[in-house]
Amino acid sequence: MRTNYMFAFLSALSLSILFAVACKKDKETTYAPLAIKDHDTVFVHPGLLHTAADFERMQAKVAANAEPWLSGWNQLTVNSHSSLNYSASPQSIVYRGADGVHDENYAILFNDIAAAYASALRWKVSGDEAYAKKSISIMNGWSAKLTLLAGTNDSVLAAGLYGYEFANAAEIMRTYKGWSSSDLSRFQRMMLNVFYKVNHNFLTRSERCMAHYYANWDLCNMCAALSIGVLCDDRDIYNEAITYFKYGAGNGNIKNAVYYIHDGGLGQWQESGRDQGHTMLGMALMGAFCEMAWSQGDDLYGYDDNRFLKGAEYVAKYNLIEDVPYVAYTNCLGVDQEIISDASRGNARPVWELIYNHYVKRKGLSAPYTTRYAEKVRPEGGGGNYGTGSGGFDQLGYGTLTCTRDPQ
């Protein structure tokens, strides 16, 4: 998922300088979870990708052997990351990006997060506390050891992708009576000091060309900031992410991500001229962002006349091997994409159940191409089901189990 084109080097150089300045300035700064002060700061818990009502639905549907929930559950239980025999390997420093000195080891982190999340789901649906203990042991191991994300500029992606995924696992497990308050607090501190510090520095960067980074860079860091804000009961961090979605200068801003609305209502995605793998990742990240905000009562799915739905329909239609209109994409750094890319066209990622179930089942809206893509990928698996590389772990998955709902 590294940046393409001639600006990759400039990307790394400019952000490394920015982070060096930011880290020097904030060298002594550490974060601690904020105490809840008044009603305005109270969050729903669990309240990220899944709420208590969602887990009640999953439990009831699986117990009744109802489809497609049962098929989604079976995808979870056969995945090796949900096994009680899974062995985690916490690291003190995680490297993403070949810096010429250290070996990259970030695959260890994303595999362990996939295991923590899968175990958390198995506990919530089955009630078997052995899975709760497995999830907690993985997260306690990492919070006791991890101190730094390093490597190259790609460490920013690690902070975003693994930050929001780890926060989601923890948000589920905070409801487990066996996770001590001291261990939860230590995990929250890790999320703030190791992950959020990078998220914040990236989202508050100041560059001559804010279109420098593709949408997925902003979106993963927005997802991490929002989810860490909820996990740590910090309304300011949460609001920082929401504000960026609406008004941010970079491509995570919804109007920059879905940057052109064609006649007929299809919304062209910012990375469509790059490749379809990263475009599909954009669906995963913006979908997760909107769902997590929805859990806290903020409707970003519907923002700007359902702009995200228009983008999702565009991406789904093209990846169903149908023609879509396209306008040339250019940016202030000289990127010039005259045609839509067919690289990785039609790829499968476990992202469509969430989008489909919101717009079609919750809201009763028409989303024919999103519907067809959800049907194509169903039942959705999780980490490891879509390849062993980073792309297969950039989304938590299992949406058929977790997101399927009856029509309202």
Image: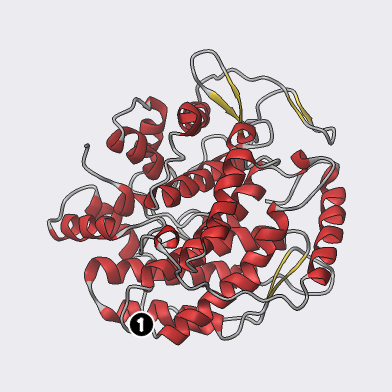
Q: Residue 126 appears at what percent x and percent y? A: 23, 69
Residue type at mark 1 is Lys
Q: How many marks?
A: 1
Q: Residue 265 appears at what percent x and percent y? A: 49, 19
In the displayed structure, 293 sits above or below 194; it is above
Instruction: Describe residue 52's horizontal placement relative to residue 334 as left or right.
Output: left
Q: Quadrant of residue 123?
A: bottom left
Asked whether residue 80 is in view, the answer is no
* Residue that sits furthest to the left in the current view: 64
Residue at position x 48%, y 83% in the image: 140
**Visual colour scheme:** secondary structure
Residue at position x 65%, y 37% in the image: 275
Instruction: Describe residue 63's horizontal placement relative to residue 39 as left or right.
Output: left
Observer-nearest of 232 and 292: 232
In the displayed structure, 284 sits above or below 95; it is above
Observer-nearest of 387 and 316: 316
Observer-nearest of 246 and 124: 246
Residue at position x 15%, y 55% in the image: 65
* Residue that sits furthest to the front in the current view: 38
Q: Residue 119 appears at what percent x and percent y? A: 37, 71
Residue pointed to by mark 1:
133
- The crowding category of the residue bearing disc 1, from other C-alpha atoms within 10 Å (few below 14, some 14 to 19, many at least 20), is many
Name the image quarter holding the C terminus. top left
Secondary structure of the residue carrying tag 1 is helix
Instruction: Describe residue 296's horizontal placement relative to residue 110 as left or right.
Output: left
Residue at position x 30%, y 53% in the image: 401
Q: Residue 233 appears at what percent x and percent y? A: 47, 66
Asked whether residue 128 is in view, the answer is yes
